[in-house]
């Protein structure tokens, strides 16, 4: 074999080794990112969903909040009154 062929083969081997190291680095990064997604997927989905709803219906939500509050007000007062009675008339 000539010296040029040996050098070309050696360069290919070095490139192959460098690419293997880079591949392992990318795999570690992907593992780290997938771990984060697995640990936080619930909160990420809720945040994304709430943001989508707010951006899509901002005026509707602001208009509905007082109506929702008026609808829930008796339920909240009733719940608070029952808890207060239990605390006052405990024994």
Image (spheres, rainbow, N blue to C red):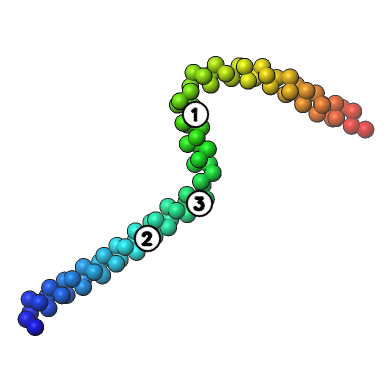
| N-term-proximal mark, 2 vs 3 | 2
Q: Is residue 36 above or below residue 84?
A: below
What residue sits 48% from the left and 23% below the top?
Answer: 57
On the image, numbered disc 1 is attached to which residue? 53
C-alpha distance separating marks 1 and 2: 35 Å
| N-term-proximal mark, 1 vs 2 | 2
On the image, numbered disc 2 is attached to which residue? 27
Of the two numbered discs 1 and 3 in the rendering, the one whose residue sits closer to the viewer: 1
**Residue 68: image x %, image y %?**
63, 20
Q: Is residue 91 above or below residue 75?
A: below
- Quadrant of the snapshot with the N terminus: bottom left
| N-term-proximal mark, 1 vs 3 | 3
C-alpha distance separating marks 2 and 3: 16 Å
- Quadrant of the snapshot with the C terminus: top right
What residue sits 46% from the left and 31% below the top?
Answer: 52
Mark 2 element type: helix
Of the two numbered discs 1 and 2 in the rendering, the one whose residue sits closer to the viewer: 1
How many marks are shown on the rendered structure? 3
**Residue 5: image x %, image y %?**
10, 77
């Amino acid at each position: 074999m000539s010296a040029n062929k040996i050098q070309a083969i050696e360069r290919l081997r070095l490139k192959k080794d460098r690419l293997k190291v880079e591949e392992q680095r990318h795999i570690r990064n992907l593992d780290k990112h997938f771990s984060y997604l697995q640990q936080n997927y619930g909160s990420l989905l809720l945040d994304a969903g709430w943001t989508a709803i707010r951006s899509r219906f901002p005026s509707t939500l602001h208009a509905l909040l007082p109506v929702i509050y008026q609808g829930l007000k008796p339920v909240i007062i009733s719940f608070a009154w029952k808890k207060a009675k239990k605390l006052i008339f405990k024994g």
